[in-house]
Amino acid sequence: QCAEYELSTVLIHSGNANSGHYYAIARTDRGTWHEFNDVHVTRLTHRQMERMCAAGGALADGGAYMLIYHRRGTEAAPNIQPPQPTLAWMESENDRLSNLRTAMRMEREILRFTVVLGAIVTPSAPHSADQLERTTVTLELHGSKANIIDARHLAYRKMIPAALQKDLPLSACRLRKFYQGDNRLGETFADEEQAPLKTIGVSEHVPLMLEFLRPHQERFAPYSPSESQFRLFFWDSNDRVAKPARAEYHFAEFGTSLQSQAWYSRQSSLPPVEVTARDATVADLAEAVCAAIGIPLDEIALFRLGDLCRQRDTHILHLGDLSARLGNDARLVSGDGVLVACKSTQPPEQVQKEYKETADFISLFFNNPVNNSSGAPIHYDLSVKVDRHISLRALKARMLAMLPEVANASLDDFHLKRSAKASQLKDQDLSVADANLTDQSVVHIGNGRVIPKGHIMFRLFQKNAESGRLEPLFRLNVLETGSVDDLRAAVTSELGFDASQCARVRLTEKPLRGDQGEILRDG
């Protein structure tokens, strides 16, 4: 039996596959068409309706998206069932979509965050560092159902092997926030252990640290937002560098003091030490450092390193006066570095001398000027280590002395730049430090004489009367404070003309593109 259907509504989509807007065009009982677009209703002519629904309008630009028809007549519609395979496919698709929606809801509730293992000190016999399989793990827990206790249990099982769990019981650890960018310890969740993870600020952006009690420490100190935290460094006498406090450096410099202690987390740096006293002194800091590294106070020397992220001091302060207050006398503020040295092998005077010598020297990379005109890319694969207080002239001499190809050339035939396209470093008496050249900086050696300090170098061209092309003449250095008249006089003299002929010389600016720019007027 045939039935007739009549178009009643057209759904239209405007936008693209990722986002957009839906609206409808519907026909009323009177047979007129209207556009229903949010709160706006507009009557359309039949021609307007056809144009809006044209097949040429793809989804990205609008066009008919779905058509809705009404059956004409009053007869009941026949009960037509889809084939059985189609019904089975529809049921399986509905089940799959339902499971997918459930999985997506669960996925939105899952929190993924990182846990790092803090340095561990235990009074038992030393163990191999290989017994610690991982010092960083990523946990996945339900943000609304799991709490910080669940996270601590899971991190403990993943990071502490069974052979070490007797010396490092679960009851001796806790989780706290760890801001790796600042190397700063944060909140401890002491009063929020039963709260869901997503309500206490646990997220993928801030890692947590699994922290263990130190030997002879009965309980963890409460967290105070106003406490001062200091990063620990060990002084390496061989490399003459301050290295973050890690067990491998600890063993190298203080091995004789660790006969009864074992550090497992060799791969990770020590967390900063905390000082909570209001008017804390160097003695309070020294006590915290000794508790952290497990070495008696009479075997270590402490130095103030300052903020290593923002500055590099050439002088480090020996914290020998234990009664000095941290903020005023010792000039230590939260976030500064504290250098630890072994008194028996690293006397304070020796450490200060080695640190100053190391801080004064920087490494610079430079190029071979012989290859500048070959058309090949410039490689800064040569390096030199120099005192940052030497002059640029002495630096140039040091670098050229390392190049046999230019060993007999004059220093004045080369100039220095910060890069190939930068301006010359004109003041040859300027120190490396005052020229803002820092460790690992690049210095470009260019071919050509040095432009004197306070001068500007001009390149002069002359137009060939026959070919009409510009031909290079010479280069000329003129005082920065000079005028166009001074430049014209210098050009006249360089050309060998009499001074009376100066007015006959016309100078025109040569732009980067083209042959001729504006005339340089008198003045």
Image (tube, helix red, strand yellow):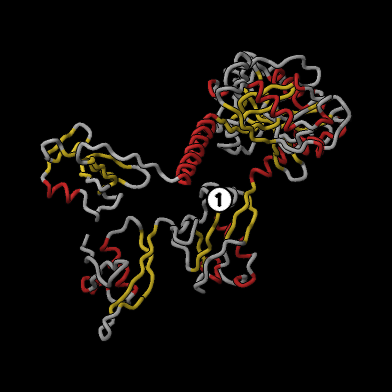
Q: Quadrant of the C terminus?
A: bottom left
At 62% from the left and 61% from the top, the residue drawn is 382
Residue 234, compared with residue 486, is above or below; it is above
| Residue 52 percent coordinates (x, y) | 19, 48
Left-right relation of 68 to 344: left
Left-right relation of 479 to 51: right
Q: Which residue is mark 1?
A: 432
Quadrant housing residue 151: top right
| Residue 9 percent coordinates (x, y) | 22, 41
Of residues 349 and 445, the one nearer the viewer is: 445
At 24% from the left and 45% from the top, the residue drawn is 3
Residue 486, compared with residue 87, is above or below; it is below
| Residue 169 percent coordinates (x, y) | 79, 22
Quadrant housing residue 458: bottom left
Left-right relation of 88 to 10: right
| Residue 166 percent coordinates (x, y) | 84, 24
